[in-house]
Amino acid sequence: MQTDPAQNTFSVDDYLLQQGRMRLVDAIVGVDEGQAVTRAVVKTSWPLFKDGFVSPMLIVELVAQTAGINIRWNELQKDRDAPPGGGLLVGIKKADFFIDAVAADSVLITRATQGYRYLNYAEYTGIAAIDEESIAEVVLQLVRTD
């Protein structure tokens, strides 16, 4: 897996279309053909934030954004000048949450690994962790809309 050392060669802006409070990913830790790993710090501005915590349901979006980074990285490997694609239609195939809430300022490391892929359809398994303790496992179905 290619990682992003101190040079910060993987800019989130180059890989995600989400902006404002819907941009959950703070940094790309690593990416290769089959997976991406991201880092995110839970902020009070995140959707579903209340009373110092965020709902673990937001991990679904975090996995989707991490998968989106992997998809965009693969596109750029084929064509460095590829324009950003359209959005992704995301379906939740499975979601297991091992905590009830995620505290503000928690650092989440999310790994999205590509599974089955056919044409513009792909499945990704995502695992989110805090301090190397798994807090959720999500399987998403993604369809590229363009």
Image (cartoon, rainbow, N blue to C red):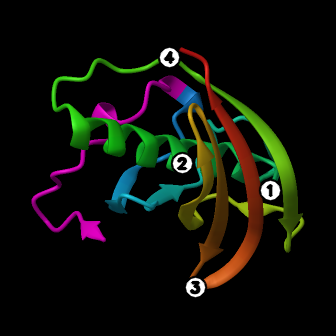
The reply to whether the magenta stretch includes residue 17 is yes
Q: Which one is in front, 2 or 78? A: 78
Q: Mark 1 and mark 3: span between their CA atoms?
A: 16 Å
Name which quarter of the figure residue 127 lies in. bottom right
- Which residue is under mark 1? 56
- Which residue is under mark 4? 86
Choose mark 3 or mark 2, whichever is in front.
Answer: 2
Give the mark nearer the N terminus: 2 vs 4. Answer: 2
Give the mark nearer the N terminus: 1 vs 3. Answer: 1
Choose mark 2 or mark 1, whichever is in front.
Answer: 2
Q: Which one is in front, 113 or 103? A: 113
Q: Which one is in front, 50 or 140? A: 140
Choose mark 3 or mark 4, whichever is in front.
Answer: 4
Q: Is residue 48 visible?
A: no
SS class, disc 2: helix
Give the mark nearer the N terminus: 1 vs 4. Answer: 1
**Residue shown at 50%/26% (left/top)?**
18
Mark 3–mark 2 CB contact (< 8 Å) = no
- State whether residue 99 is above or below residue 126: below
Query: Is disc 3 surrounded by few (<14), some (14 to 19) or many (20+) residues within 10 Å?
Result: few
Amino acid type at image mark 3: Glu
In percent of width and height, residue 24 lies at: 54, 42
- Which residue is under mark 2? 67
What residue range appears in magenta? Answer: 1-20
Give the mark nearer the N terminus: 3 vs 4. Answer: 4
- State whether residue 133 is above or below residue 129: below
